[in-house]
Amino acid sequence: MNRPAPIRRNVPLELWVVLARAFDAVERHSRASIARFGLGTTEFGVLEVLYHKGELPVCEVQRRILVESSSTTYVVDKLVARGLVRRRPGQEDRREVLLALTPAGRLLIARIFPSHAAAMRRAVSGLSPRWQAQALDLLRRLGLDAARRLHHKGDLP
Amino acid sequence: MNRPAPIRRNVPLELWVVLARAFDAVERHSRASIARFGLGTTEFGVLEVLYHKGELPVCEVQRRILVESSSTTYVVDKLVARGLVRRRPGQEDRREVLLALTPAGRLLIARIFPSHAAAMRRAVSGLSPRWQAQALDLLRRLGLDAARRLHHKGDLP
DNA sequence: GTTAAGTATCTCGATATCGAGATACTTTCG
DNA sequence: CGAAAGTATCTCGATATCGAGATACTTAAC
């Protein structure tokens, strides 16, 4: 009935599993925190990036919040409808649409961001600051390399 | 033009960002690998857990693949329709529905799993085995603690 | 033993996300 | 210049996922 204790198993596969689990658990914290303010995580992401970076073209926002372009349009539509974000045609590059917070949007995100940041601090507080920094470094390397490999087509034989 | 080098900024928030980015990048590898076989990641997840654990009640499968119960029903419906999985009423606990692979399902997952595992090995190969083990440990601690905190209601003030 | 609370599964409606393709503009290069 | 390739955004249809609630069964409490 017992399998013969696969001591050092498949580390890469296990790493993928714990990565997914950790992301899921932390993301639930994020989702719950953001839901307090009647926003979805993607909507919050747009507000937050505009809050910290100022006016940006849609494509720049899209790259930062990790959703496809059609979803970005959808979410921005909702934020514009709620009067939190405004669109403006790009000046130098007329393909672009520039996004910025409205005063109402700025007010909202300024009010809720600190509380959300605190929630996220608690969410990752299972690691001490020292280990958080270590995890930060490892995850950055892992993510950058995996992203780089996505373009190397040779990977799927 | 340069900001004054915010040397050690908000580590928890940055950790959350790189966690999300790393998950996204590795998940794209997973998705691309699985798409080769005409399956979605959740469908693959069900096949894989039944392949490695044998017959299981729906709730057990659900816990492992990290989706809500209604989505599990939806995905299992599709797999049953394709003849890859079968349902069977639970014996001891008659609330349960037991899931198991059909011969066709077992054949399929046995055929594709090794190739997918290889793809995931490449996806996380930005870290050496030593650092993979370190990341595994940190992510496990991070995930378990974050999951534990989800029930502590005191966290959102 | 009866009731209450808990758990497992499923149904149904709502919605967030995706992917393919359309359009408009920009950059590159012969 | 002018064509071709590349990029930014949006539209539209399809679908995966969720959340609330319904049903059936089990466990715990008294």
Image (cartoon, coloured by chain):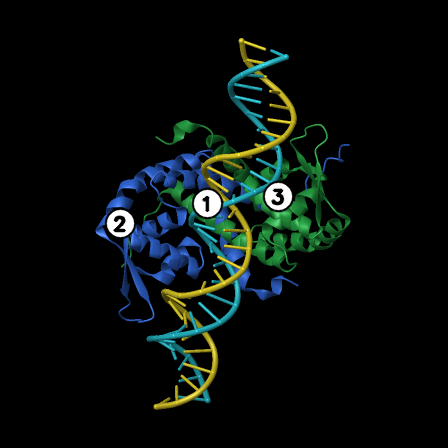
Chain colours: A blue, B green, C cyan, D yellow
Which of the two discs, 1 and 2, labels the residue nearer the N terminus?
2
Closest to the observer: A35 or D23?
A: D23
Question: In the figure, residue D10 lies in which quadrant?
Answer: bottom left
Disc 2 is attached to a residue of which chain? A
Q: Which residue is identified by label 1?
A: A136
The N terminus of chain A: image quadrant: top right
Spatial distance from mark 1 to mark 2, Cα to Cα? 30 Å
Tag 1 near tag 2, CB within 8 Å: no
Position of residue B25 in the picture relative to residue A48 (left or right)? right
Residue at the image position 72 percent from the left and 40 percent from the top: B54
Residue C23, compared with residue A103, is above or below; it is below
Closest to the observer: C25 or B81?
A: B81
Q: Amino acid at mark 1?
A: Leu
Q: Nearer the viewer, mark 2 or mark 3?
A: 2
Q: Which residue is identified by label 2?
A: A105
Q: Nearer the viewer, mark 1 or mark 3?
A: 3
